Image (tube, coloured by chain):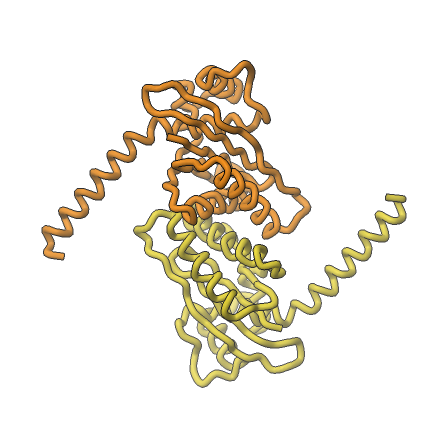
Chain colours: A orange, B yellow
């Protein structure tokens, strides 16, 4: 299973792609940051992020996309830009028929370090170890995107089974109601 | 000048298209609401909004797109969905090379009624009058998208001149600095 993790942002949008499956070693496929200029109009910036992410999707062909769930931890203006960058990533995935999952920052941190409040150094160290890299991934701020992708590889199987169960239940419920 | 106004939302995204120029009568071209289901995944909803808006852009060929500027007037979850729907509209415009402007709800209300805190009935009444319609535009909640488009027709000229002046100044400043 190949997962693209996206750590959304207008100025820097981290993208990390990982191959793996629960119980098997992970492999780094690609890691990068898509950048747009803070002095450009927002529409142009969203287009720049779309172009960057779509090129990576078309080249690397992930099976699933995991996007960091955005919270209002910062000021409203920043959150809205981050939400819009996340929206662009989700839209690009949906256009390709790729499943999209969202994980919170603490879910990603907990997945790779065991601690949902781990600091950046700890997340980077574990991402480096789990992907068996010789050094920390570069650019440094793309480590979060890799943690997100790893989180999804490990949670993906369980989530898919839960979703299948949910849909199965819903189908039965509808059937029972005579629809 | 043909302007598409977009009142963004995930559940209901209002789209109103108006022909006009400062000092000349306005004409209604089209008004509708793009809807997506609240039970669909967000990625699917963003794709639904994109598909709807792009079809309208390709059919009606606006010269400019005016999107309502989103504020955190509601809960964070709603604001983020609204911001993402706005992002989809801006992205679709940017992909077509269309200029994108953002106006606040009070700018749109003030443009059509003279009062930035006018209520919905007043906005609808003035939109109906300014577009010389026989009755209120339907769907009713698309009146805001039309007010936004009208606001842009009237402000557009002034904004374009200011932007030209700003770019001119910047060019001169840079020239003066020997760059």
- Who's the residue at 24% across and 34% down the image? A161
- Who's the residue at 33% across and 56% down the image? B37
Quadrant of the image occupied by residue A108: top left
Q: Nearer the viewer, residue B123 or A20?
A: A20
Quadrant of the image occupied by residue A48: top right
Q: Compared with residue B66, is residue B176 higher up or lower down, i.e. above or below? A: above
Q: Is residue B35 left or right of residue A121?
A: left
Percent position of residue B157, x then y: 69, 69
Percent position of residue A5, x then y: 46, 33
Percent position of residue A148, x then y: 44, 29
Q: How many marks?
A: 0
Q: Is residue A61 visible?
A: yes
Q: Is residue A165 left or right of residue B6?
A: left
In the rendered image, the quadrant that contains the C terminus of chain B is: top right
Q: Is residue B109 visible?
A: no
Q: Compared with residue B92, is residue A157 higher up or lower down, i.e. above or below? A: above
Percent position of residue B103, x then y: 58, 61
Q: Compared with residue B167, is residue A160 higher up or lower down, i.e. above or below? A: above
In the rendered image, the quadrant that contains the N terminus of chain B is: bottom right
- Who's the residue at 58% across and 79% down the image? B26
């Amino acid at each position: 299973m190949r997962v693209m993790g996206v750590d959304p942002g207008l100025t820097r949008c981290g993208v990390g792609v990982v191959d793996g499956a629960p119980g098997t070693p992970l492999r780094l496929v690609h890691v990068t940051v898509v950048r747009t200029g803070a002095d450009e109009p927002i529409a142009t910036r969203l287009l720049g992020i779309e172009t960057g992410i779509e090129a990576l999707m078309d080249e690397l062909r992930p099976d699933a996309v995991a996007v960091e769930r955005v919270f209002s931890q910062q000021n409203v203006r920043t959150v809205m830009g981050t939400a819009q960058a996340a929206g662009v990533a989700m839209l690009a995935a949906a256009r390709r028929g790729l499943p999209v999952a969202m994980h919170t920052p603490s879910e990603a941190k907990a997945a790779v370090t065991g601690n949902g409040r781990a600091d950046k150094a700890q997340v980077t160290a574990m991402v480096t170890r789990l992907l068996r890299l010789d050094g920390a991934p570069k650019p440094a701020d793309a480590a979060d995107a890799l943690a997100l992708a790893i989180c999804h590889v490990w949670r993906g199987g369980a989530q898919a089974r839960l979703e299948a169960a949910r849909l199965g239940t819903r189908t039965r419920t509808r059937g029972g109601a005579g629809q």
